[in-house]
Amino acid sequence: MRKQFIVKKEMQFKLIFTVVLLFLLIFVISSCNIYLLMNYFISQLSKQSPEISQAISDIFVMFRWRLLLIVGVNIVIVILIGILFTHQIAGPAYNIERVLTKMAEGNLALRVKLRKNDQLSNLEEVLNLFLEKHRERLRKIKVITIEVNKLATKCKNNNEDTAELARLSEQLEKEIVKIKIEEQD
């Protein structure tokens, strides 16, 4: 069970605000349409029967306050649903950000782990694949580097070791070339 629903305040509140704003926009447009239609029907009815027109007008006034109450309750419901929904996005974003920060510090032994119902699961898979490929490449580089260092220290007079050192150096270069450090134009 989730313990904390507000994980990334700024992101979540921005998303919730957008959803509430959209809800209010739909409400205002719908209310304006209902108001215009009601006024049109009341004006048409007032020509035929002023008593019915007045009754409908009174109902419309009573309806308006109940409608505002319903809108208020709906806004609260939209905010609560927004918090739950945005948590499924902000939680994974926070987790991915945390893992990437630790990777930037040099810790590549991590995996991104998201909860079952969280959004961004495809990003989780791609990041974990990315990490695994780089860990594999760095393991090879590490092993080759250790071998190169061993051979370099004992390679002072031995031609056979020099040939092996050259071969390992070539392998190391091939692995390093696979890692792009700078953007290509």
Image (spheres, rainbow, N blue to C red):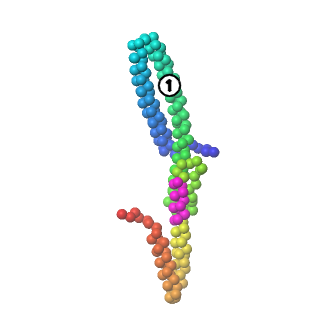
Residue at 49% across, 17% down: 59
Position of 168 relative to 29 (above/below):
below
Number of numbered markers:
1
Question: Is residue 49 left or right of 120 when viewed as pictured?
Answer: left
Q: Residues within 10 Å of mark 1 (few under 14, many from 20)?
A: few
Q: Is residue 89 in view from this perspective?
A: yes
Give whichever of 119, 41 is nearer the camera: 41
Q: Is residue 105 in view from this perspective?
A: no
Q: Which quarter shows the C terminus?
A: bottom left
Give whichever of 116, 153 is nearer the camera: 116
Give whichever of 103, 38 is nearer the camera: 38
Where on the picture, by quarter, is residue 154? Answer: bottom right
Q: Start and end of the magenta stretch?
A: 122-134
Q: Position of residue 74 (x, y in %)?
A: 52, 31
Give whichever of 81, 53 is nearer the camera: 53
Residue at 60% across, 50% down: 116
Position of 118 relative to 133 (above/below):
above
Q: Position of residue 167 (x, y in %)?
A: 49, 81
Q: Residue farthest to the right?
A: 1
| Residue 123: in magenta span | yes
Main SS type for the magenta part?
helix
Position of 171 relative to 42 (above/below):
below
Q: Position of residue 133 (x, y in %)?
A: 52, 65
Residue at 42% across, 17% down: 42
Check disc 1 and report the residue beneath it. 67
* SS assignment at label 1: helix
Q: Position of residue 37 (x, y in %)?
A: 42, 23
Residue at 39% across, 13% down: 47
Position of 36 relative to 111 (above/below):
above
Amino acid type, mark 1: Leu
Q: Residue farthest to the front?
A: 48
